Amino acid sequence: MAAASQEEVARKLGYASPAELILHLPLRYVDETRITSLRDARLGDTVQVEGVVEHAEIQNRPHRQLVVQVLDGASGNARLICRLLHFYPSQVALLKPGTRVRLLGEIRPGFFGAEMVHPQFRVVRDNTPLPESLTPIYPAVAGLSQHAIRKAVAAALAEADLSDPLPARGHFPSFADALKALHHPPPDADLTALEARDSLAWRRIKFDELLAQQLSLRQAARQRQVLRALPLPDDGALGKRLLAALPFSLTAAQQRALHEIHRDLAHPYPMNRLLQGDVGSGKTLVAALAVLPALAAGTQAAVMAPTEILAEQLYLKFHEWLTPLGIEVAWLTAAHKGKAKKATLAGLADGNIHIAIGTHALFQNEVNFHHLALVVVDEQHRFGVAQRLALTEKGAVYPSPLTPHLLMMSATPIPRSLAMSYYADLDVSVIDQLPPGRTPIATRTINANRRAEVIARLRDYCLSGSQAYWVCPLVEESEKLQLRAAEESHAELVALLPELHIGLVHGRMKSHEKADVMSAFKAGELHLLVATTAIEVGVDVPNAALMVIEHAERYGLAQLHQLRGRVGRGARESSCVLLYEGPLSDTAKRRLKIIHDQTDGFAIARADLLLRGPGEFLGARQSGQQLLRFADAEADADLLEQARNAAAALLERYQGGVQRHLARWLPRGLDLYRA
Ligand code: ADP
Ligand code: MG
């Protein structure tokens, strides 16, 4: 293998330039700093010994191998047998009798005494000096030798400016010392702490990484504050009227969230806030109250939902709550056509319609707002970044220098540590409380071989005046198969339960068909609603208190939690039956146990995070987020907190240093999670 150039090494390892190699940190180390005499080496020890080749031959039994006998003269002529199972002709040529070698490996018992299988070896002279530091083993890729990586990294370290661009932090070593301790640790270094990535040097590096992330996110937040938005102070008048008409009052958590939103809206720069709240925590009402300042100011608001069913549900709620206040509410989805659509578009363009609720149809080219000042995105995680951007850009058209305020809502809670590290440019409000009077949902996991029993119970339940959902198995491979599964379940239940009125709703239905079924269910005309995950989010029918989920093992945790959240919305006792088909995989087992034991969405999200890791959890591709290389937002929460605190002060006082720190850590910039 020809020696790779530094550029080649950097490129193969995925770096844009050799300078980035300074942060290519070792996975582990081997100790070549001392030589153990063969006499002192104990079985099982990994040691380096030195000796002279006495004899070498290729044997063919039990399998082809190069067997080398080494004599340790300094050790009273002790002998070691080395076995190389894979070897090159060049190695055979090297290991001639008389050659002095250093061998590193584990001492094992062999038929003829001590042995090493596949030792790492080096040909040396009598007086070749020993290295002064532990030898790093780097993450590698095929076609790159450790030797080449070591050389390239060492060269990068020698060339780089390793000084600290930002003021020293008392308890950490300097950047240069930290890198030295990691790339070339002294022989007496604590290997356990090093390899567990828990030494002071590691903590400095992780802190620096988290600091870079926090600095760049904060910078982005500042850039947002340079954008202009129409300040929308709240005088509270419309809100008072809306609340007076409701049969309940806001929970303390709803009030807090609403207060935070209204405070942001009063600023002359755009709000970028995420409203998190568990399923059923009452985000819709908060959203309806949140838009009032925009309407009071004579501007418009848009509310975007990921599905037609959800858009319609939102529309019905907003219509019910806001129309009595003299507010014109309209809705717009892909299903709206002809005259009605024309009227809506005209109303949006001339400002006679104050608030538009809809799906992504809201940001099609033909839609123009008179003065869009606030955008609300429900279930934001279901939209891509581009879709959200498109809607906020609608507002930038007129009056041109202004950007609309943005409120995003999500029932898939992001644990605090993750939110802090990946969404630092996003202000987060949390509704951590459910409206009073909800009874907890009892969850049961039942083997599908007891399906008939479950169906019999379902009949009694529905005949006693309650309503229920039957959620069909998820078929990820194809929407067609998914549809067939839904139709089959529906047909079967209709046949088995002739005394019940049973509806079917799925994603392939025309939207007016869906709407008809949903409103029949809402009105209590249907006992049972057979559904695909079309009902996953937002559906609100308080009288439905039982849900059966078929093939629950196919669903993810967040999805199960969302689905289950469709029941437990009224005062009656609710339950959720998870039918599963055995045998279950370990992950499926763990998932079902979590959903069975936990009802709190935040606890479920944390468990989900542990099960899947942050990349998959956040949907790294969707958020375009570069994940952390060294630090872990959960495990290093203390460092994250420190970095977050330091970032604010540093940005104030050390602009130059901040830019150098960012250039070192994020040479290619941070692909920001932006609205
Ligand atoms: P989600 O947060 O999942 O979007 P919703 O906004 O659909 O929840 O609210 C669930 C139900 O709770 C709705 O029927 C809503 O009218 C009701 N609700 C909202 N706030 C309160 C409250 N403070 N007290 C009682 N019921 C409430
Ligand atoms: Mg909702």
Image (spheres, rainbow, N blue to C red):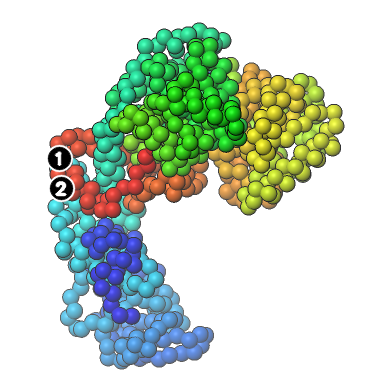
Image mark for residue 165: 2
Left or right placement of residue 189 versus residue 195 in this view: left
**Residue occupying the point 41% across, 26% down:** 370
Tell me if I can see residue 434 in this picture. no
Q: Please name the amino acid that badge 1 sits on.
A: Tyr
Q: Residue at x 29, y 31 (%)?
A: 401
Q: Secondary structure at mark 2?
A: loop
| Quarter of the figure with the C terminus | top left
Left/right of residue 132 with respect to residue 606 in the rendered view: left
Give the quarter of the figure containing the N terminus.
bottom left
Q: Residues within 10 Å of mark 2 (few under 14, many from 20)?
A: some
Q: Nearer the viewer, residue 30 or 626?
A: 626
Query: Marks 1 and 2: CB-CB under 8 Å?
Result: yes
Mark toward the start of the polypeptide (1 vs 2): 2
Of the numbered discs in the image, which one, if any, rests on residue 654? 1
Residue 661, image x and y in percent?
20, 48
The CA distance from mark 1 to mark 2 is 9 Å
Q: Residue at x 34, y 67 (%)?
A: 12
